[in-house]
Amino acid sequence: MKIRSGLVGFITVIQAVLFAAHFLIYETWTFSNSVSGVAAPLWLKLTLGALSISFLLASLLAFRYTGALLRMFYRVAAIWLGLLSFLSLAAAAAWIVFGAASLSGLALNFHRLVEVLFAFGLAAGLYGVFNASFTRITRITVRLANLPETWRGRKAALISDIHLGHVRNRSFLRRMVAKILKEEPHAIFIAGDLYDGTAIDARRAAEPLSKLSAPHGVYFVAGNHEQFGDDSKYLHAVSSAGVRVLSNEKVEADGLQIIGVPYRHATQDTHFASVLEGIGVDRDRASILLVHAPDHPQVAEAAGVSLQLSGHTHVGQFIPWSWMARRIYRQFVYGLSRIGKMQVFTSSGAGTWGPPLRLGSNPEIVMLQFE
């Protein structure tokens, strides 16, 4: 009962925020028009009212149902949610400029200012949709102490946060698999959030993974979106596609230790530490830890891990969320960083969650070359 009431409260807060954002846009536009003596049309109010409930409604339906029409509705609502962020920022900026101009006694064409800022916001959002559709290859050289001689010069692919669901689907995963195989990596790591958590035929969606192959294996750890509830259907689907699912365990790959800890077991310092202790990392040999989120790298470093590979952050995808992501994860929000003797690489991910937009971050497949 407490969980249900908490969920209702969360949904209420989110919807209130969405109403407020749409109200800000509406009031900004109508006020700018009233200054010019033009009344806002009724259709604008009705359209914004419908859009204000679109994403939450689409999300609630998406967790229970699937189908072509729902997928289309969800995509449109998700894209609008992204555009809403940019338009809200544009509206806020317009009022700030208007207030500053009024205090300074400067004449200002508020309507023209709003038009320009809204146009800029829409253009930025549409570019974000375009940018999110093109996955890049990011190449990184990693130097590890005690790296086995056999691994020097070898490559590994890292991919995370594909988010298969109502926006990204099996054809998207098929393209990612083709890009990875073209690079001929010696090992392939999938760092969680393969699925979005919405209603989906998990086994059918994961079928393209059966084409993945690498001399030293293909490995997967669960992310938070697989573990919203029972993750068994996702793990079985990945395993059935021939991918090794790592769950609090270590495998040996030609002298290199590969460790996998799913999201649920890495959220709390003490439990994460006990899991790594139970796995038994050999500090005198190079090791790679696959864990979805870069939440507690200090725990992995204390356990003697050489390199942690993660995703999860998306680098916030676009402003203002990118600012929040950088504030939360700081140096570990993206790229290669170091803590003590351990290195951490955090990928921005290949897909998107929520709005299929990226601005200031790129979708990527990471190719790691070991030295």
Image (cartoon, grey):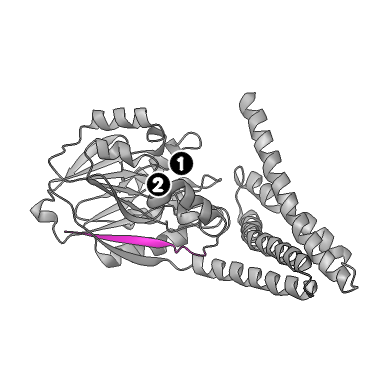
| Residue at mark 1 | 224
Q: Which of marks 1 and 2 is nearer the N terminus?
A: 2
Q: Quadrant of the C terminus?
A: bottom left
The front one of 70 and 270 is 270
Quarter of the N terminus within the rendering: top right
Residues drawn in magenta? 359-371
Going by the image, does 209 lie left or right of 8? left
Q: Is residue 130 magenta?
A: no
Residue 103 rendering spot, x and y as whole percentages = 77, 64
Disc 1 crowd rating (10 Å Cα; few below 14, some 14-19, many 20+) is: many
Q: Nearer the viewer, residue 189 or 182?
A: 189
**Looking at the picture, does residue 183 appear above or below residue 289?**
below
Q: Do the residues under discs 1 and 2 have CB atoms within 8 angstroms?
A: yes
Judged left or right of residue 155, residue 2 is: right
Q: Residue 364 is drawn in which quadrant?
A: bottom left
Q: Residue 195: percent from the left, percent from the top?
A: 47, 48
Residue farthest to the top, as pictured: 1
Three-letter amino acid code at the position of disc 2:
Gly
Query: Residue at 52% of width from left, 44% of height from top?
Result: 197
Magenta stretch contains residue 368? yes
